[in-house]
Amino acid sequence: MASSPWFGVHTGLQRTSTDELISLWKRIEELGLEWASIWDHFYAADGSGDPDCLEAVSCHAALAVTTERIRCGSLVYSAGYRHPAVLANAIATIDQLSNGRAVLGLGGGWLEGEYQAYGIPYGSPGERLRRLGESIQCVQSLLNEDRTNFEGEFFTMTDAQCVPKPVQDHLPVWVGGGGEKVTLRVAAQYADGWNLPFISPEEWARKSGILTAHCEDVGRDPKAVTRTVNVGIAKDDDDLRQQFDRIAEFVRPGVLMGEGQELVDRVGEYIDAGAEAVILAMRTPFDLEALDRFAATVIPAFAAK
């Protein structure tokens, strides 16, 4: 575990272009941040119903080949959109493309409108989370074992193989979400990392405590799970609404506002709560000046902690 917090950027894929994304990823790396990630949506993730959104696996591969140093993550792939064998083979190849810098995030899925639009079964919350639990087991086995045999409610594999393997000896698999009874227990059982977006430091700390309790309950060291938070950044209320549309008020508790010491203090509350990384969730219009200020102001303030 790192002795000081690290920082990254989660790059939204809605209403943008590949050229704009590549420029942003290179800027993130130049500024000295340690992480860039993509989401997994077919429609804009703001409740608007806008279908203008780039595809996730393709963008994850592009992120891998257009950067040289940063970790290349996903926050998070929906377990309902791809069979785990399809996803495991894609991620193994992305790790090859990145020379061992890929991180795979998985979640249960939440944007019901895109499921309905494409006729993908959405299911109940319980079904989505059980599918997540099976998917992470299958993916981890395919990435790490020579052969995978699995028989579950949603997936069956028989002597399944994923070759070539990732470059990394162990490709980290993260779980995204804060469901207290199932999601956090899945994270405690299987995940190398955990991420929760758009939540206050106090609520993040409470959820992290529940994750710790689940780890202890399943006999796993709580420190084995890297704990991170996604936060937005906005100039003002108008900027907040432009980025997040109909979900602006929902995400407000986890959006950074202000400048200078205000930003440092707010980020410090997440670090004090136990977050090992703070990841800026940036959506179009990408505010590169805000990113520059964050890198110049916030990151140095925590370099020695």
Image (cartoon, grey):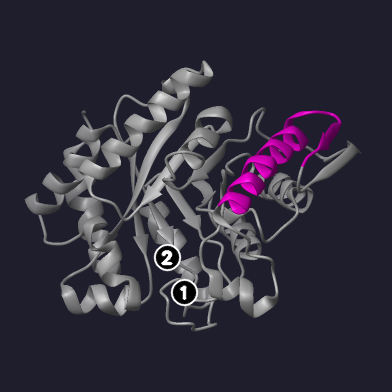
Q: What residue do we see at 23% from left, 55% from top?
A: 294
In the rendered view, tell whether residue 282 sits above or below residue 270. Answer: below
Task: State the quadrant of the C terminus.
Answer: top left
273 relative position to 185: left or right: left
Q: In this picture, which residue range is highlighted in magenta?
A: 126-152
Q: Dot 2 surroundings within 10 Å: few (below 14), some, or many (20 or more)?
A: some
Q: What residue do we see at 42% from left, 44% from top?
A: 195
- Residue 261: x and y in percent read 7, 50
Q: Is residue 159 inside the magenta stretch?
A: no
- Residue 228: x and y in percent read 37, 41
In the rendered view, tell whether residue 27 sits above or below residue 278. Answer: below
- Residue 168: x and y in percent read 65, 33
Closest to the observer, 280 or 110: 110
The type of residue carrying mark 1 is Glu
Q: What residue does disc 1 label?
A: 20
Q: For mark 1, give the secondary structure.
A: helix
In the rendered view, tell whether residue 3 sits above or below residue 230. Answer: above
The dot on residue 24 is 2
Q: What residue do we see at 52% from left, 15% from top?
A: 219
47 relative position to 125: left or right: left
Q: Dot 1 surroundings within 10 Å: few (below 14), some, or many (20 or more)?
A: few
Q: What residue do we see at 55% from left, 75% from top?
A: 113
The type of residue carrying mark 2 is Leu
Closest to the observer, 81 or 234: 81
- Residue 276: x and y in percent read 34, 34
| Whether residue 54 is visible | no
Identify the residue at the far right of this view: 159
